[in-house]
Image (cartoon, rainbow, N blue to C red):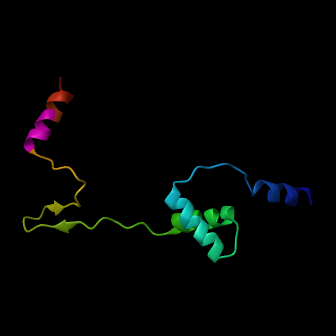
């Protein structure tokens, strides 16, 4: 019986967290819609997010056979490569 009580006590952890207002709104609406506490809602949403399959980036192959990777917001130019190489070998 002691093991069961200890396991039950250790399965719930109380903590204080700070949420962005949009995350709080989402969790709060989820909790109300599912008639559960905010803590239970956050636990469920966290588990759901972790268990979702991750999307692999779509890699297209160009006509020349080279892969075309998704944009990351920065254009890699020969000047950028040269400056990085110069910094690395200084």
Q: Identify the residue at the far top of this view.
A: 90
Identity of the residue drawn at 53% across and 63% down: 50
- The image quadrant where one finds the C terminus is top left
Residue at 17% across / 62% down in the picture? 68
Residue 46 painted magenta: no
Q: Main secondary structure of the magenta part?
A: helix
Q: Nearer the viewer, residue 5 or 27?
A: 27
Q: Quadrant of residue 82?
A: top left
> Residue 88, image x and y in percent?
20, 29
Q: Is residue 90 above or below residue 38?
A: above
Point out residue 86 in the picture as x, y percentages from the top left corner.
Answer: 14, 29
Q: Identify which residue, 14 or 29, lies in the foreground.
A: 29
Q: Is residue 34 left or right of residue 80?
A: right
Left or right placement of residue 46 versus residue 62 in this view: right
Percent x, y for residue 65? 11, 65
Of residues 50 and 41, the one nearer the viewer is 41
**What residue is shown at x 59% (from left), y 70% (from top)?**
29
Farthest residue in the right direction?
1
Give the residue displayed 64% in from the left and 70% down from the top: 31
For the N terminus, the quadrant is: bottom right
Q: How many marks?
A: 0
- Range drawn in magenta: 78-83
């Amino acid at each position: 019986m002691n093991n069961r009580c200890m396991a039950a006590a250790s399965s719930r952890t109380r903590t204080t967290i700070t949420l962005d207002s949009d995350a709080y709104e989402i969790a709060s609406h989820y909790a109300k819609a599912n008639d559960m506490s905010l803590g239970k809602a956050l636990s469920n949403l966290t588990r759901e997010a972790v268990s979702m399959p991750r999307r692999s980036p779509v890699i297209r192959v160009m006509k020349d056979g080279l892969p075309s990777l998704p944009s990351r917001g920065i254009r890699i130019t020969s000047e950028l490569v040269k400056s990085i190489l110069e910094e690395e070998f200084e």
